[in-house]
Protein backbone atom coordinates (compact mmCIF):
# COMPACT_ATOMS: atom_id res chain seq x y z
CA UNK A 1 0.00 0.00 0.00
CA UNK A 2 1.34 3.43 -0.94
CA UNK A 3 1.46 6.37 1.45
CA UNK A 4 0.39 9.85 0.33
CA UNK A 5 1.27 12.95 2.36
CA UNK A 6 -0.37 16.31 1.71
CA UNK A 7 0.45 19.59 3.43
CA UNK A 8 -2.12 22.39 3.41
CA UNK A 9 -0.59 25.83 3.95
CA UNK A 10 -3.66 28.07 3.57
CA UNK A 11 -7.44 28.27 3.92
CA UNK A 12 -8.28 29.44 0.44
CA UNK A 13 -10.16 27.21 -2.01
CA UNK A 14 -6.95 27.08 -4.08
CA UNK A 15 -5.27 25.36 -1.13
CA UNK A 16 -8.16 23.19 -0.01
CA UNK A 17 -9.71 21.78 -3.20
CA UNK A 18 -6.50 20.26 -4.61
CA UNK A 19 -5.64 18.75 -1.22
CA UNK A 20 -9.09 17.21 -0.76
CA UNK A 21 -9.46 16.04 -4.37
CA UNK A 22 -6.04 14.38 -4.50
CA UNK A 23 -6.46 13.04 -0.96
CA UNK A 24 -9.81 11.55 -1.90
CA UNK A 25 -8.40 9.99 -5.07
CA UNK A 26 -5.42 8.54 -3.18
CA UNK A 27 -7.67 7.11 -0.47
CA UNK A 28 -9.98 5.60 -3.11
CA UNK A 29 -6.90 3.93 -4.66
CA UNK A 30 -6.12 2.34 -1.31
CA UNK A 31 -3.29 4.64 -0.21
CA UNK A 32 -2.69 5.62 3.39
CA UNK A 33 -3.46 9.34 3.30
CA UNK A 34 -2.09 11.93 5.72
CA UNK A 35 -3.24 15.53 5.32
CA UNK A 36 -1.37 17.99 7.53
CA UNK A 37 -2.77 21.48 8.10
CA UNK A 38 -0.08 24.01 8.99
CA UNK A 39 -1.08 26.99 11.16
CA UNK A 40 -2.01 28.77 7.92
CA UNK A 41 -4.33 25.97 6.84
CA UNK A 42 -5.65 24.82 10.22
CA UNK A 43 -8.48 27.40 10.47
CA UNK A 44 -10.20 25.49 7.63
CA UNK A 45 -10.53 22.54 10.03
CA UNK A 46 -12.61 24.52 12.53
CA UNK A 47 -16.19 23.23 12.70
CA UNK A 48 -18.38 24.91 10.08
CA UNK A 49 -15.57 26.39 7.98
CA UNK A 50 -15.52 23.82 5.17
CA UNK A 51 -19.24 24.39 4.69
CA UNK A 52 -18.43 27.97 3.60
CA UNK A 53 -16.10 26.80 0.80
CA UNK A 54 -17.70 26.60 -2.65
CA UNK A 55 -16.14 26.34 -6.07
CA UNK A 56 -17.88 26.62 -9.42
CA UNK A 57 -17.96 23.16 -10.94
CA UNK A 58 -16.10 21.69 -7.96
CA UNK A 59 -17.22 18.75 -5.81
CA UNK A 60 -18.66 19.30 -2.35
CA UNK A 61 -15.59 19.76 -0.14
CA UNK A 62 -17.33 18.41 2.97
CA UNK A 63 -18.16 15.19 1.09
CA UNK A 64 -14.51 14.93 0.01
CA UNK A 65 -13.38 15.39 3.62
CA UNK A 66 -15.79 12.77 4.92
CA UNK A 67 -14.89 10.35 2.12
CA UNK A 68 -11.20 10.58 2.97
CA UNK A 69 -11.96 9.90 6.63
CA UNK A 70 -14.26 6.94 5.85
CA UNK A 71 -11.46 5.42 3.77
CA UNK A 72 -9.03 5.73 6.68
CA UNK A 73 -7.33 9.01 5.78
CA UNK A 74 -5.97 11.09 8.61
CA UNK A 75 -6.52 14.82 9.04
CA UNK A 76 -3.87 16.39 11.22
CA UNK A 77 -3.74 19.99 12.48
CA UNK A 78 -0.34 21.29 13.54
CA UNK A 79 -0.21 21.78 17.29
CA UNK A 80 1.14 25.30 16.73
CA UNK A 81 -2.34 26.30 15.54
CA UNK A 82 -3.58 25.96 19.10
CA UNK A 83 -1.38 28.86 20.22
CA UNK A 84 -0.75 30.76 16.99
CA UNK A 85 -4.36 30.82 15.78
CA UNK A 86 -6.24 30.50 19.10
CA UNK A 87 -7.85 27.27 17.94
CA UNK A 88 -8.83 24.87 20.70
CA UNK A 89 -8.86 21.14 19.93
CA UNK A 90 -12.59 21.06 20.67
CA UNK A 91 -13.13 23.73 17.96
CA UNK A 92 -11.90 21.33 15.27
CA UNK A 93 -14.03 19.12 13.04
CA UNK A 94 -14.66 15.55 14.06
CA UNK A 95 -11.71 13.36 13.17
CA UNK A 96 -9.03 16.06 13.16
CA UNK A 97 -5.97 15.11 15.20
CA UNK A 98 -3.66 17.69 16.74
CA UNK A 99 0.03 16.85 16.63
CA UNK A 100 3.39 18.42 16.00
CA UNK A 101 5.32 18.67 12.77
CA UNK A 102 7.98 16.27 14.06
CA UNK A 103 5.38 13.54 14.63
CA UNK A 104 3.87 14.16 11.21
CA UNK A 105 7.26 13.91 9.54
CA UNK A 106 7.91 10.63 11.35
CA UNK A 107 4.58 9.25 10.09
CA UNK A 108 5.30 10.18 6.46
CA UNK A 109 9.03 9.44 6.28
CA UNK A 110 8.37 6.61 3.83
CA UNK A 111 5.65 8.37 1.78
CA UNK A 112 5.82 7.61 -1.91
CA UNK A 113 3.77 10.64 -2.93
CA UNK A 114 3.83 14.13 -1.43
CA UNK A 115 1.93 17.31 -2.25
CA UNK A 116 1.87 20.78 -0.75
CA UNK A 117 -0.82 23.39 -1.33
Image: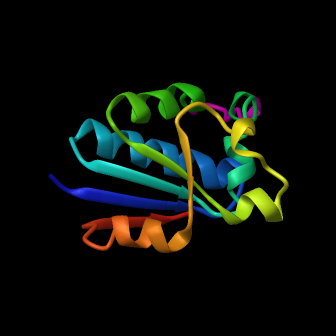
Q: Is residue 54 magenta?
A: yes
State the extent of the magenta-drawn residues as a range: 52-58
Residue at position x 30%, y 65% from top? 113
Quadrant of residue 41 within the rendered picture: bottom right
Determine the main secondary structure of the stretch shown in magenta. loop
Residue 9 relative to residue 95: left or right = right
* Position of residue 67 measured from the top left corner of the image (x, y, whole percent): 42, 28
Please, which residue is most extreme toward the right here?
A: 86
Query: Relative to the observer, which residue lies in front, 66 or 103?
Result: 103
Query: Relative to the observer, which residue lies in front, 13 or 63?
Result: 63
Quadrant occupied by the C terminus: bottom right
* Position of residue 61 measured from the top left corner of the image (x, y, whole percent): 58, 32
Residue at position x 69%, y 44% from top? 89
* Position of residue 3 measured from the top left corner of the image (x, y, whole percent): 26, 58
Residue at position x 39%, y 39% from top? 24
Q: Is residue 65 magenta?
A: no
Amino acid sequence: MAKTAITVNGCEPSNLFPAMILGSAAAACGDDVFIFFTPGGAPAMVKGELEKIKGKGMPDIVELYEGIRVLGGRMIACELCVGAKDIKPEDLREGVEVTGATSFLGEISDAQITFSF
